[in-house]
């Protein structure tokens, strides 16, 4: 059984843990570097990326996650998690602490403020029918490097992408009953 960690410093943690367990995998909260030891994959949840990034740095998780990723651990960022994975950010957020593992340029809050949150179906490459996308102050990818495979895009930009064992989506699959995005990630962890 695959062991999947969910970064538990801030954000939608319990929802991810619940979905991973419903997929039949083991889900473990991650608060400190030692928690990463035997993981096949790690999920970075939605929440507030400045808070998540700062706390990760304080707990020494940034370096530890990078090391484990280079050893083969897959990483899945949802919403704020996409921001944490981005090599570059636009619009005054450039310096915020993050992993910067994925060759993507991301615009935070690309759809506007909280009241501009919405739900819309998203057709993701590799999943046969659209998943329900819950967009809450969501980021988008405005530019992606050659190694990045675009999995879904809207008019505003790319909303799902993969680079090797990295997966990033703008929306919140953990706030729906649809397990397919998590199953997609579990397949990546096994590869
Ligand atoms: N706008 C938030 C950020 O950039 C992300 C929002 C979310 O995860 N729902 O941190």
Image (cartoon, grey):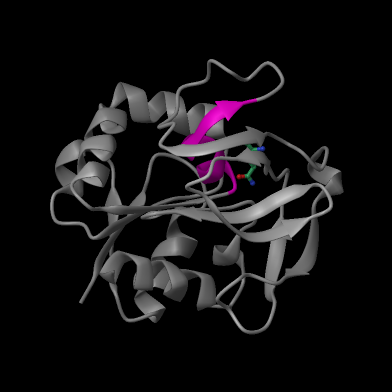
> Is 87 contained in the magenta span?
yes
Tell me residue 117's x, y (percent): 80, 51
Point 45% across, 62% down: residue: 16
**Along the line of sight, which residue is nearer the eye, 165 or 179?**
165
In the picture, the quarter occupied by the N terminus is: bottom left
Bounds of the magenta span?
Answer: 79-89
Tell me residue 111's x, y (percent): 81, 43
Identify the image quadrant of residue 161.
Answer: bottom right
The correct choice, above or below, for 117 with respect to 187 in the image is above
In the picture, the quarter occupied by the C terminus is: bottom left
Left or right of 175 on screen, residue 148: left
Point 58% across, 78% down: residue: 127
Point 26% across, 29% down: residue: 63
Left or right of 55 on screen, residue 50: right
Quadrant field for ligand 1 = top right
Tell me residue 103's x, y (percent): 50, 37
The correct choice, above or below, for 15 with respect to 112 in the image is below
Q: Residue furthest bottom?
A: 128
Identify the image quadrant of residue 144.
Answer: top right
Left or right of 105 on screen, residue 63: left
Give the total of numbered labels.
Answer: 0
**Along the line of sight, which residue is nearer the eye, 134 or 14?**
134
Tell me residue 62's x, y (percent): 31, 30
Point 54% across, 40% down: residue: 145
């Amino acid at each position: 059984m695959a062991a999947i960690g969910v970064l538990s410093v801030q954000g939608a943690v319990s929802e991810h843990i619940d979905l991973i367990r419903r997929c039949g995998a083991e889900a473990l909260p991650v608060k400190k570097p030692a928690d990463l030891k035997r993981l096949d994959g790690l999920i970075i949840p939605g929440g507030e990326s400045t808070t998540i990034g700062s706390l990760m740095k304080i707990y020494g998780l940034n370096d530890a996650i990078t090391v484990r990723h280079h050893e083969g651990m897959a990483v899945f960022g949802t919403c704020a998690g996409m921001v944490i994975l981005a090599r570059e950010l636009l619009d005054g957020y450039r310096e915020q602490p993050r992993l910067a593992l994925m060759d993507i340029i991301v615009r935070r809050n690309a759809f506007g403020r909280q009241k501009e949150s919405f739900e819309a179906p998203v057709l993701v490459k590799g999943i046969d029918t659209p998943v329900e996308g819950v967009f809450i102050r969501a980021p988008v990818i405005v530019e992606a490097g050659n190694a990045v495979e675009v999995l879904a895009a809207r008019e505003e930009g790319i909303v799902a992408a993969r680079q090797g064992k990295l997966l990033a989506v703008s929306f919140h699959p953990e706030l729906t009953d649809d397990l397919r995005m998590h199953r997609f990630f579990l397949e990546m962890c096994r590869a």
